Structure formats: structure tokens, C-alpha cells
Image (cartoon, rainbow, N blue to C red):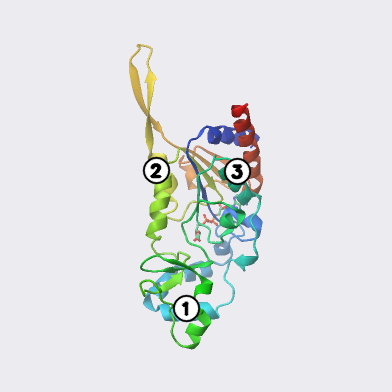
Amino acid sequence: MQELIERAATDLAAASYAVALTGAGMSTESGIPDFRGPQGVWTKDPDAERRAYLSYERFVADPGAWWKERLSAPIGALGSLEKTEPNPGHRALVELEKLGALRCVITQNIDNLHKKAGSRKVLEYHGNAFLLRCMNCNARFDFGEFDLQKLNEEGKLPPRCPDCGSVVKSDTVSFGEPIPQDVARQSLGEVVKCDFMLICGTSAVVYPFAALPRTARARRAEKEREALSGLVAVERLPAVTIVEINAEPTPLTLEGVSDYLIQGNTGDVLPQLVERVKAKMGAAKG
Ligand code: APR
């Protein structure tokens, strides 16, 4: 593993535009269970996963009833997210951003921990559990901007967007719900710009997020090489180096979408990666 961390530090320090893609594995060391790992929410309660698949359909059919149920429901499967704190993995990504080695975090996590840790450019692909979103204009709101209990008592659910009057939902993206256009577009914009992608703590089985590494893998960069004959040959080489940090191999590993996997915990591996990158950047300045 040490050799691979060293290799990743070399690749990252040499990159001109690096992005990180993250999943629930980033937050297990903060006490939030993942979904499909051995202790995952869906692994332990397949019924909960089946119910989750029906949520968006029910919302579209009757958003008022959906909200009524939501307001009376006990705390969700992920527990009380407010009380959770970032772990060394989250903080390591903040440091990489401060070093200028990382440009953006694209996360599937709704737990707000990347922002809480201090990451500045964060794209929340599956939304944020602390926000609401207008289903029409994509405006985001804090929960405090609506008195949901009062709306419930007055029979005025679902909440309505003050800008365009459309229905407002929690910002979290349910199964079957389209990814909000603004986040989808910005994320793709990062993926087509990057030359290094760090994929942390995801099983990479949920689409369309899992397509992002594949889009990066498909990109080619033309590199010129002078042949012995003196002729210049143009080679079309992979444009992006893709590195996974995960507790177990994923389809990206098995299908060769990633260049290599560092099999370990993000909270353990990422801080080590930061130290090596710092050393290389220091040596480069030297
Ligand atoms: N460090 C590294 N890897 C870890 C750690 C850790 N500390 N803890 C767990 N893992 C790994 C697990 O082994 C698993 O491979 O992280 C992965 C988490 O995968 P999932 O549970 O499938 O989570 P994720 O990929 O984020 O799920 C995607 O599915 O249920 C939906 O909307 C939900 O955003 C979520 C999406």
C-alpha cells in the first residue's frame, strides 16, 4: 500500500487539474453507515432499499402526502446527520484543495461533511440533506426558510417556491429522480477538464454518478512522440489518471476503468497521501 500511496502522490503532484469523486465510504469513519458495505444500510435492511426506490414515485403522485409522512417520520436511516463530524479523510481533501492540488469534490453524500470540513468547491450530486430544492427552478433553500409544521397544521403542504410557485422537495435526490441539471452540468464540466481523478469510498454501482469515471476513462489526449526515424508520431493516450481508494475492489477496478486501487480506509490513506504530496510539492519548490 505504501508504494501505491507514493505513486498516487507522484501522479497527483504532476497533475494540472485533479478532481475527487466520493461516496458513503468517506463518512463511515464519521459514524454514518454506508449502503452496500458489510455494515451497509441496504445490506442490513433490503426492505428499506425497496421502500427508497418507491419514494420519488410517491412524491410525484402526491407531494403533500409525501411531506406529511416525512414530517411525522422518525429520524432517517442515516441517523441524525447534524451531530456527525468530518473525519481525517474529509480534512485531507480540504488540505489538498488548499495546496492547489485538488480543484473540486464531486460527492454522492448528502451529509454536508465535505463543506463542514471546509472544502470550498463541492458539487453535491445527490443533493444535501440540510437543504430544500424547487422542483422547477432548482432554487435551494434552508429548512428554516419554511415553517413546515405550520404549513402542515394549516393543510398547506407541499411547500411552494417563493420564486416560481412550484413544489419544493428535500434537496436529496431519490432513486429514479433526475439529477438536478445545474449539478449534473457542472460535474460533467469538471470531469471533461480533469487529468487526475481520485475516487474515494464508493462502490461505483449507482448511475449516473458511476458513469463519470467512465467518461473520464474514455477521454484521450494527443501526445507527440519523435520516432527514431525523426518523424513525429501522434499518440492518443488516456487523458486521465484514475485512482481509487476503497475498502474493497469495485467494478471500476475489475473492468480496468481505474488505473489502480489503494485498498484501505479513506480516513487512513488520504492523510498519508497529503503528506507525500506536500513533500513532493516542497521538493519541487526546493
Ligand atoms: N474507507 C474506504 N472505503 C470504505 C470505507 C472507508 N472508511 N467504508 C466503506 N467503504 C467502502 C465500502 O466497502 C463500499 O465499497 O465504500 C463503498 C460504499 O459504497 P456504497 O455503500 O454503495 O455507497 P455509495 O457508492 O456512496 O452509494 C451510492 O447509492 O444508496 C444510494 O444515494 C445513495 O449516494 C448513494 C448511492
- Point out the residue furthest to the top here: 229
Nearer the viewer's eye, disc 3 or disc 2?
2
Q: Which residue is mark 1?
A: 67
Rendering quadrant holding ligand 1: bottom right
Question: Contact (CB < 8 A) between labels 1 and 3?
Answer: no
Going from N to C along the chain, the mark reached first, 3 or 2, is 2
Examine the rendering and report whether any part of residue 190 can be seen: yes
| Residue 177, image x, y percentages | 40, 65
Marks 3 and 2 sit apart, C-alpha to C-alpha, by: 26 Å
**For the residue carrying disc 3, how many other residues have a C-alpha within 10 Å: few (<14), some (14-19), or many (20+)?**
some
Residue type marked 1: Trp
Residue behind mark 2: 192
As helix, strand or loop, the secondary structure at mark 2 comes to: loop
For the residue pair 207 and 83, the one nearer the viewer reads as 83
Residue 16 percent location from the top left of the image: 48, 35
Q: Quadrant of the N terminus?
A: top right
Residue with the most extreme front position: 163
Three-letter amino acid code at the position of disc 3: Gln
Find numbered disc 1 in the image and state the secondary structure of the residue it sits on: helix
Question: Residues under labels 2 and 1: Cα distance?
Answer: 38 Å
Secondary structure category for the residue under label 3: strand
What is the spatial separation of the Cα atoms under label 1 and label 3, in whole angstroms?
A: 41 Å
Q: How busy is the neighbourhood of tag 2: few (under 14 within 10 Å), some, or many (20 plus)?
A: some
Residue bearing the label numbered 3: 263
Question: How many numbered marks have been drawn onto this rendered protein structure?
Answer: 3
